[in-house]
Amino acid sequence: MSDKYSILLPTYNEKENLPIIVWMIVKYMSASKFDFEIIIIDDGSPDGTLDVAKQLVKIFGEDKIILRPREKKLGLGTAYMHGLKSSTGNFIILMDADLSHHPKYIPQFIGKQKTDNSDIVTGTRYAGDGGVNGWDFRRKLISCGANFLTQFLLRPGVSDLTGSFRLYKKPVLEKLIENCVSKGYVFQMEMIVRARQYKYTISEVPIAFVDRLYGESKLGASEIVQFVKGLLYLYATT
């Protein structure tokens, strides 16, 4: 069986970004001749993101763009579970729809997975020529601080834990999601910590992360508190 890649795109108020990110994914995946599908999971965006997604289905076709909308915002972990149920690929790619993750890295993820036969490939901002563009000092400080604290407490053997640009073997992702208890910002971190517990192999690809062009950033004080609580929970239980 040849490999197929299901790309899950959870969206909330991304009507400006969605057409660009979908076009870029199609461009890079088609150029590399990979078999793929894009599953858009919109959580009841009031800005008309779903209407834009419906137009994209007309442009790129129902076999390439699959819509799995939900009534309201229910969290990232459940969005991935919802999208997974409809996926037909044996590999799953998780990425943000806000253009912070460049689709040009997807072929690199796939190449790395094939070379290492890894269970997970994760994009890292903290190794090689990875980095962050467009963040102010506060955001960089929070991100680096969170990463340092996590490395110190959990020693996960991965340089970037809070990133959400990853490729998984489908059964690996299913098992991890089933066993994850965190929601929101902490979810990505717990996925890697659990992966280490189950002895899954993880490879890294350096990425340049770009801050969102349109719309509001979703990281605020409540997310930071939630992150620290989640980190301490994982430290106590893993």
Image (spheres, grey):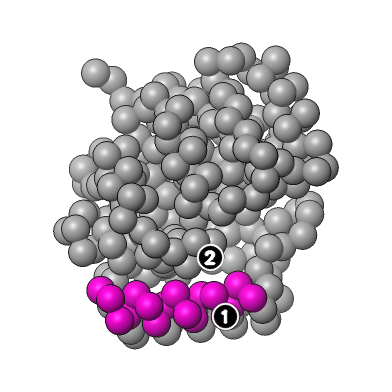
Judge left or right: residue 143 versus residue 108: right
Q: State the image coordinates of residue 47 (x, y, percent, origin top left).
A: 82, 42
- The residue labelled by disc 1 is 225
Q: What element carries label 1?
A: helix
Q: Quadrant of residue 151?
A: bottom left
Q: Does the magenta stretch include residue 212?
A: no
- The residue labelled by disc 2 is 185
Q: Residues within 10 Å of mark 2 (few under 14, many from 20)?
A: many
Q: Give the range drawn in magenta.
A: 222-238
Q: What element carries label 2?
A: helix
Q: State the image coordinates of residue 53 (x, y, percent, origin top left).
A: 70, 29
Judge left or right: residue 14 versus residue 197: right
Q: Residue at x 31, y 56 (%)?
A: 179
Q: Which of marks 2 and 1 is nearer the N terminus?
A: 2
Per the picture, the main secondary structure of the magenta-coloured stretch is: helix
Amino acid type at circle 1 is Val
Judge left or right: residue 179 versus residue 42: left
Q: Is residue 225 magenta?
A: yes
Dividing the image into 4 quarters, which one contains the N terminus?
A: top left
**134 vs 2: above or below:** below
Q: Which residue is drawn at 53% across and 44% down?
A: 79
- Can residue 107 be seen from the camera position used here? no
